[in-house]
């Protein structure tokens, strides 16, 4: 296929697969794998090795470097407070155990030669952040479990690659020489240099940005070019050592308080989604189905050992005394999908081993791809079910995060909480939170946009955000900061300006206007002190929405719809959502004085 149409097809199908996974709540990597198999070995529309030639390897390497950098940005050192000991044991002891147990599986179950067994087991210690991160976002795990999987996946990637490179080069050197001691010393020096390059690069960018040496419009392009430059430069010292450098660069920039970090994370996340989609489709499309079909029964036994023995055993042994309970160990021991890094390293080093005439080298890539497909499908489809059965994730994330503690927002939080929805109120004034605390409403004291709040907020049950302060610009900043977590259709802010202006704000880069702009901040404040309160009304077949509207007078205004399936519509009157029986309407109504009630 001609190169340009091939690239366009991969891009279109990659984003389409991501959209379908979001629309139907399916693991994105599963759909990407299926798409690659269909357009590659299935129908033969593209053949990446032939269409892209040597460019394919370069694309994969650069993509993996950017993906690892973006992953490093998400690694926050404050998370080590809850996962520090468990993470150290999971990586420091779990990785060597996974390598050793994997080696035994390669030798005993698959019957591979010693060099290929060592290399294959080193490749499979990588758990793949390109697969883990989308699964974590879809599942909304508890913070400690999600943090462990995230840190392990991102840190293991460069370590696993370095381990594979060391084993590969050791095998090549010892083929012609009796010892590889010089190679080990050289690699140790390269690792230290790679870490230093990443740290220095992060602090250098911070200095240049904060001293005004780089204009705003060039900051993000400079970061991207620095990532690629550091990766290429570090690789001059040692093959693929650059993966470690860019990971350290990302970790450094994510933890030194750079002002550009919020824009950078959003920018990098967008790039990563595109790169993961494109690269994974290219790699699966390049798969040789015939080599997979030629795998015998020993390969099936090997995959079962990797799934049910190697990973679970390594996790359980390495986390003894770590503070993890049996549910967390069981979950982490099962969830270990492999991804792009494992596929690319296997394809690269497997070819080189075959060139040097190593026995069983031709089985390396097929076995890795078989493990990738097995883990992506099994772990991708089971993660939500297992996390819920073990109590490590919420059945539904329909809680409401309310920013701004005022009498009216506290009243709204009380009604929502009484309706069975988790609520968390955030304000930077301890005094303003007093009434909410007395009512038993969960609160967080602090600035929502600060690193401290990011470190301490548990959003595992939160599914919506309502910015309810009187500062329109601040509300917009909060919505933009959390739109990647909740989604654009689940972040709302109160209208502050005139209704006509509020309607114009919907298309801009901010949250959706709550209540469809029908009730503004100033109006809520005034009406609240006039005696208006939030009230919930449950609809039935005998008393439907038409009856509710007919019974409503000028002193009652419907605002929020609580659907029977748990979803919330903060703008249902504007979005034309039709209330049904068993739905609940929260309205703002004028309460009659006690004397009139009598």
Image: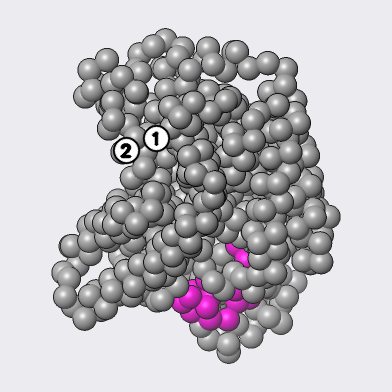
Q: Is residue 471 something that shows in the picture? A: yes
Q: Is residue 400 something that shows in the picture? A: no
Q: Nearer the viewer, residue 89 or 474?
A: 89
Residue 166 location, x and y as percent?
51, 49
Asked if residue 412 is positioned above or below residue 132 in the image, the reply reads below
Mark 1 element type:
helix
Q: Crowding near pointer 2: few (<14 within 10 Å), some, many (20+)?
A: some
Mark 2 or mark 1, which has the lower sequence index?
Answer: 2
Q: Crowding near pointer 1: few (<14 within 10 Å), some, many (20+)?
A: many
Q: Is residue 19 magenta?
A: no
Question: What residue would you read off at disc 2?
Answer: 59
The image shows a total of numbered marks equal to: 2
What residue sits 34% from the left and 27% below the top? 10
Residue 365 location, x and y as percent?
52, 28
Residues marked 2 and 1 touching at CB (< 8 Å): yes
What residue sits 48% from the left and 75% below the top? 451
What residue sits 34% from the left and 61% below the top? 264
Q: Nearer the viewer, residue 506 or 223?
A: 223
Side (left or right) of 504 relative to 125: left
Residue 522 location, x and y as percent?
40, 73
Mark 2 element type:
helix
Q: Is residue 463 magenta?
A: yes
What residue sits 37% from the left and 34% below the top? 278
Residues under labels 2 and 1: Cα distance? 8 Å
- For the residues carrying marks 2 and 1, which lies nearer the camera in this image? 2
Which portion, as a residue range, is magenta?
443-464
Residue 485 location, x and y as percent?
49, 56
Q: Image quadrant of residue 209?
A: bottom left
Question: What residue would you read off at disc 1?
Answer: 279
Side (left or right) of 405 relative to 473: right
Viewport quadrant of the C terminus: bottom right
Q: Nearer the viewer, residue 399 or 295?
A: 295
């Amino acid at each position: 296929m001609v190169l340009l149409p091939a690239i366009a097809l991969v891009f279109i199908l990659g984003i389409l697969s991501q959209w379908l996974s979001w629309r139907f709540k399916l693991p994105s990597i599963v759909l990407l794998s299926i798409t690659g198999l269909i357009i590659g070995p299935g129908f033969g529309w593209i053949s990446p090795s032939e269409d892209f030639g040597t460019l394919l390897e370069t694309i994969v390497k650069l993509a993996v470097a950017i993906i690892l950098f973006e992953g490093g940005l998400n690694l926050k050192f404050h998370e080590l407070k809850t996962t520090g000991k468990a993470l150290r044991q999971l990586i420091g002891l779990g990785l060597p155990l996974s390598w050793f147990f994997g080696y035994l599986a390669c030798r005993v179950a698959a019957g591979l030669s010693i060099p290929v067994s060592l290399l294959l087991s080193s490749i499979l210690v990588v758990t793949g952040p390109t697969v883990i991160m989308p699964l974590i976002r879809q599942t909304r795990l508890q913070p400690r479990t999600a943090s462990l999987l995230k840190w392990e996946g991102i840190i293991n990637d460069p370590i696993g690659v370095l381990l594979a490179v060391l084993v590969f080069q050791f095998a090549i050197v010892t083929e012609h020489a009796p010892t590889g001691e010089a190679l080990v010393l050289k690699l140790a020096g390269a690792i230290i240099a790679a870490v230093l390059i990443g740290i220095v690069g992060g602090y250098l960018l911070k200095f240049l940005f904060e001293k005004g040496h780089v204009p705003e419009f060039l900051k993000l392009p400079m970061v991207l070019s620095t990532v690629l430059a550091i990766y290429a430069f570090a690789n001059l010292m040692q093959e693929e050592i650059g993966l470690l450098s860019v990971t350290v660069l990302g970790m450094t920039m994510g933890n030194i308080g750079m002002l550009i970090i919020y824009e950078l994370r959003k920018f990098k996340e967008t790039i990563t989604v595109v790169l993961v989609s494109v690269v994974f489709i290219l790699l699966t499309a390049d798969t040789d189905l015939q080599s997979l079909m030629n795998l015998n029964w020993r390969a099936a036994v090997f995959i079962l050992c990797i799934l049910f023995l190697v990973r679970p055993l390594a996790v359980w042994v390495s986390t003894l005394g770590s503070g993890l309970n049996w549910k967390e160990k069981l979950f982490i021991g099962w969830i270990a999908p492999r991804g792009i890094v494992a596929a690319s390293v296997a394809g690269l080093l497997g070819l080189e081993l075959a060139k040097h005439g190593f026995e069983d080298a031709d089985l390396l890539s097929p076995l890795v791809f078989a493990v990738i497909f097995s883990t992506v499908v099994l772990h991708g489809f089971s993660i939500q079910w297992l996390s819920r059965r073990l109590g490590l994730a919420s059945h539904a994330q329909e809680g409401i995060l309310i920013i701004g503690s005022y009498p009216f927002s506290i009243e709204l939080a009380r009604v929502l909480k009484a309706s069975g929805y988790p609520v968390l109120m955030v304000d930077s004034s301890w005094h303003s939170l007093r009434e909410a605390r007395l009512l038993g409403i969960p609160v967080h004291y602090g600035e929502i946009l600060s690193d401290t709040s990011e470190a301490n907020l548990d959003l595992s049950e939160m599914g919506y955000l309502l910015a309810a302060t009187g500062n329109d610009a601040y509300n917009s900043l909060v919505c933009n900061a959390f739109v990647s977590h909740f989604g654009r259709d689940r972040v709302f802010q109160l209208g502050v300006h005139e209704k006509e202006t509020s309607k114009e704000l919907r298309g801009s880069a901010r949250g959706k206007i709550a209540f469809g702009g029908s009730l503004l901040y100033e109006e809520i404040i005034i009406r609240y002190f006039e005696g208006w309160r939030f009230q919930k009304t449950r609809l039935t077949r005998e008393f439907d929405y038409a009856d509710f509207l007919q019974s409503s007078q000028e002193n009652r205004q419907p605002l929020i719809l609580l659907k029977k399936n748990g979803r919330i519509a903060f703008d249902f009157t504007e979005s034309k959502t039709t209330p049904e029986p068993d739905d609940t309407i929260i309205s703002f109504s004028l309460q009659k004085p006690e004397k009139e009630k009598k």
